[in-house]
Image (cartoon, grey):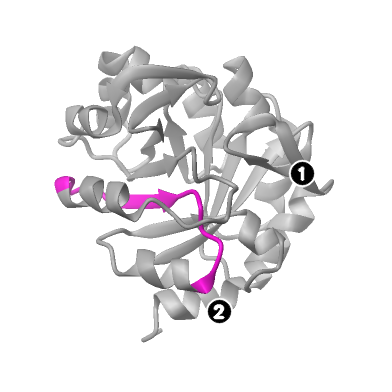
Amino acid sequence: MEVIPAIDLRGGCCVRLQQGDYGRETVFGENPGAMAAHWESEGATRIHLVDLDGAKDGRPVNIEAVRAILQAVSVPCQLGGGIRDTETVDRWLAAGIDRVIVGTQALKDPAWFRRLSLERPGKIALGLDARDGRVATSGWLDVSDVSATELASQFADLPLAAVVYTDIARDGMLQGPNLEATAALAERLLIPVIASGGVGTLDDIARVATLPVAGCIVGRALYDGRFRLKDASLLANPAS
């Protein structure tokens, strides 16, 4: 299981939100490139980027910060937030993003998302952000009537790079991930599932590693120094 450090970007800075609330923000650094380089030096094999302003505005905002990150590291980076059209997807892929995460627009225009994924196999990930099991969109500001499992099932036949599943209620709270919902989703899909939201301890990492998931995104716990990325990666991959 890949342990993936997260860099959430707002106003050009590295931040973390609690439960997706833009009013509950902690700034962890003003140099995203240096932060990415730090995680690479700690052994990161992939970095998860979120353009929080972009998710809210529906268009890329933290463009320079993402470019600085791409210039600072050699490991692949995946990016979500504000990606609502084909032109934006292709621009990020051309800039060096390894895989683009689409959430809101996959729900709003599933036919477009299907075409996008078929034409760019292995380069598109589905972002499933759920509140009480229902898909949230537009930077988690709106909650739909569609269940996360229902939306994922619509796209189960596509050549997606991954499905990134986040339980919003757990995100940034350090109280443990939603293991039951994550496992239920991963068991239904052949597409690799990446768990996100709630990891606060190495024990959480160990529990997620027992699930049939390909990766686990970790944010606040790393920034708070609750454990080191190297230790989490070793726990998740004891034979490596």
> Is 41 covered by the magenta stretch?
no
Q: Quadrant of the C terminus?
A: bottom left
* Residue closer to the observer: 206 or 13: 206
Secondary structure category for the residue under label 1: strand
Magenta residues? Answer: 188-202
Magenta stretch, overall SS: loop
Question: How many numbered discs?
Answer: 2
Q: As shown in the figure, which amino acid type bears the numbered disc 1?
A: Thr
With 218 as the anchor, is 145 left or right in this view?
left
x and y percentages locating residue 8 in the rendered image: 65, 42
Farthest-out residue, right: 30
Residue annotated with mark 2: 231
* Residue closer to the observer: 198 or 214: 198
Residue 174: assigned label:
none
* Residue closer to the observer: 156 or 73: 156
x and y percentages locating residue 199 in the rendered image: 51, 58
Residue sitting at 33 percent across and 45 percent down? 161
Query: From mark 2 to mark 1, how far is it between C-alphas?
Result: 24 Å
Q: Is residue 103 above or below residue 79?
A: above
x and y percentages locating residue 104 in the rendered image: 43, 21
x and y percentages locating residue 124 in the rendered image: 37, 36
Q: As shown in the figure, which amino acid type bears the numbered disc 2?
A: Asp
Question: Which circle's residue, 2 or 1, is located before the other in the chain?
Answer: 1
Q: Are marks 2 and 1 in contact (CB under 8 Å)?
A: no
